[in-house]
Amino acid sequence: MSEYPLTEEQIKFYEANGYVKLENVLALDQVEELRKGLELAAQDRKRRDKAAGPLQDANYEKVFLQMVNLWEFYPQIKDYVFNKRVAEIARRLSRSQHVRLWHDHALIKRPQDSSATAWHQDLPYWPMKQATALSCWMALDDVTVENGCMHFIPGSHKLGRLGAIDLINPQDLFKLSPAAEKQKLEAVPVPLKAGSCTFHNGLTFHCAGSNKTDRPRRAMVTIYMPAGITYTKVPHIVGDRANLKEGEELRGDLFPILAQG
């Protein structure tokens, strides 16, 4: 597909609000290929869980089943992660010379038996000094309020980095920020058609409801790092593999450049 027709108005909306919704970024045949890769990953996960026991706490899996860095094992997912059309959007939204991959992760909310994802920021979980990393949340199914679409607080990325939230026994994110408590913050639900997506900054407050339908809600998230992001030694399954020193730029084979201006 050709380059996505991202406008300056959409970039400014992202900068002001900390998120942006983009329609029809992937064609339906691309979505179907990504679903096939995700299904293979989910089947492999079930086999591993059966043999060795679940990798995640059962209560955590009610929030979502999460699988990280699938691009290393599944060709369909690697093709998507290296999709320049999507990565170029991230580069332009961040106004960066290039963007690198931090990691991908699949998020699946089970039908009926699921929990809401609490309000949180992403950046407190990442070993990054700078606050410019951004995520693409790509819908692989039509996503609605009923099956757990994303909600954002516009402008909340300007409130700064707060603490990480325990997604099983969540704290109240808003009480961690005096500025958030004083402001009238209104959540915006963002339904999506399959193949459409949102991008959001790592500091933007976001959550997702439970899946009340009889079908799984599948999403593929890719996290992009603009140029110059450095490592902070916050424990993380991906960062720990890189053997980086504190203050060193996140770069190398684990974090390939996906788009360059």
Image: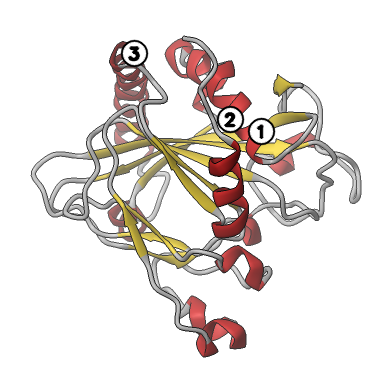
Dot 2 falls on a residue whose secondary structure is: helix
If the image is split into quadrants, where does the C terminus sit? top right
Q: Is residue 74 above or below residue 169?
A: above
Q: Amino acid at mark 3?
A: Glu
The numbered dot on residue 60 is none
Q: Name the kind of residue labelled 2 in the image.
A: Ile
Q: Which label number is shown at residue 89?
A: 2
Measure how far apart labels 3 and 2 are at the Cα level.
Answer: 21 Å
Q: Nearer the viewer, mark 1 or mark 3?
A: 1
10 Å crowding of disc 3: few (<14), some (14-19), many (20+): some
In the drawing, what numbered circle is on residue 92?
1
Q: CA distance from mark 1 to mark 3?
A: 26 Å
Vertical side of 189 occupied by 134: above or below: above
Question: Which residue has dot 3 on it?
Answer: 33
Q: Please give left or right for residue 85 compared with residue 250 in the image.
A: left
Provide residue 46's location: percent of width, then percent of height.
30, 32
Mark 1 falls on what kind of element? Answer: helix
Callout in the foreground (3, 2): 2
The answer to the question of whether label 1 and label 2 lie on touching residues, with beta carbons closer than 8 A, is yes
Q: Residues within 10 Å of mark 1 (few under 14, many from 20)?
A: many
